[in-house]
Amino acid sequence: MNEEFIFLLERLVPALNKGVLVSLQLIVPSAILGIFFGVVVGACRAFGGGVLRALANGYAALFRGTPLVIQLFILYFGLPNVGIYFQPYTAAVLGFTLCSAAYHSEYIRGGLLSIKRGQVLAAQALGFSTFTTLIWIIIPQAFRRALPGCGNEIVYLIKYSSLAYVITCFELTGQAKIVASESFRFSEVFMVVGVYYLILVSVASYGLRRLEKRLEIPGFGH
């Protein structure tokens, strides 16, 4: 058994497997919370009153307009200056959620605005409140239309979860950087890391395609 194979099996793969578990612990809650808050913010941007819509638009502009790494630095290194402290994992999940929700809100807003006004008027004529109309009639349709965009954001989330290591949350990329720095085998290490991310993205893309197919309504497309 040659040296490269021993390095791969005994040093690199165990470290990367440890890191990918942390990555999944970052990605899954961030994706779920990001979609949830994205729906809320998107609904406020599409149907909120003047102040509420302005706040939602400001939030989306702030988190879509600034680099994620800067947001993570502020959450982890900046907020302690005002007495707010987060553990690395908590800061990473919070940062990913806030950033992801801002992008999801744009897809959701577009989906909501694509629903014909007549459906809202018909629901109101049947006695539905605005909130009930949104929850049971508008948002389910809008989510189907926004799902490809939201799925694309989840794929991006998988990849930019690699930034967690900059605030000392050592996920897949962080573990790879440690191994590469100790062994000076940067090419080999990061080529294998690329394969890990490719597998994660491929699995997520397959799951999202299955979800789109599952939510398809016969006669109405996706």
Image (spheres, rainbow, N blue to C red):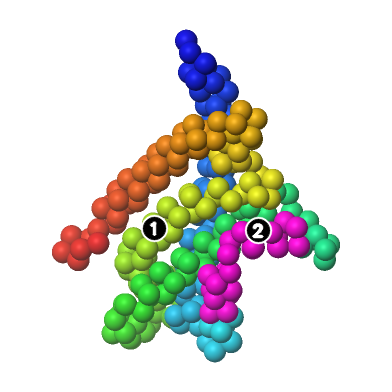
Say what amino acid the circle numbered 1 marks: Asn
User: Is residue 14 placed above or below 217 in the rendered structure?
Assistant: above
Residue projecting furthest to the left: 219
| Residue assigned mark 2 | 72
User: Is residue 23 placed above or below 125 in the rendered structure?
Assistant: above
Secondary structure found at label 1: helix
Along the viewing direction, whichever of 71 and 138 lies nearer the viewer = 71
Along the viewing direction, whichever of 123 and 44 lies nearer the viewer = 44
Q: Residue at x 20, y 63 (%)?
A: 221
Dominant SS type (magenta): helix
Say what amino acid the circle numbered 2 marks: Leu
Mark 2: few/some/many CA within 10 Å (<14, 14-19, 20+) = many
Along the viewing direction, whichever of 209 and 134 lies nearer the viewer = 209
In the rendered image, residue 110 lying in the magenta stretch gets the answer no
Q: Residue at x 61, y 49 (%)?
A: 164
Picture disc at residue 187: none
In the rendered image, residue 65 lying in the magenta stretch gets the answer yes
Residue 141 spot, x, y in % from top left: 32, 68
Residue 81 spot, x, y in % from top left: 83, 63
Residue 8 spot, x, y in % from top left: 51, 23
Q: Residue at x 34, y 82 (%)?
A: 120
Q: Quadrant of the C terminus?
A: bottom left
Secondary structure found at label 2: helix
| Residue assigned mark 1 | 152
Extent of the magenta region:
57-78
Task: Using residue 117 as the reference point, say whether residue 82 is left or right of it.
Answer: right
Mark 1: few/some/many CA within 10 Å (<14, 14-19, 20+) = some
Q: Can you see residue 56?
A: no
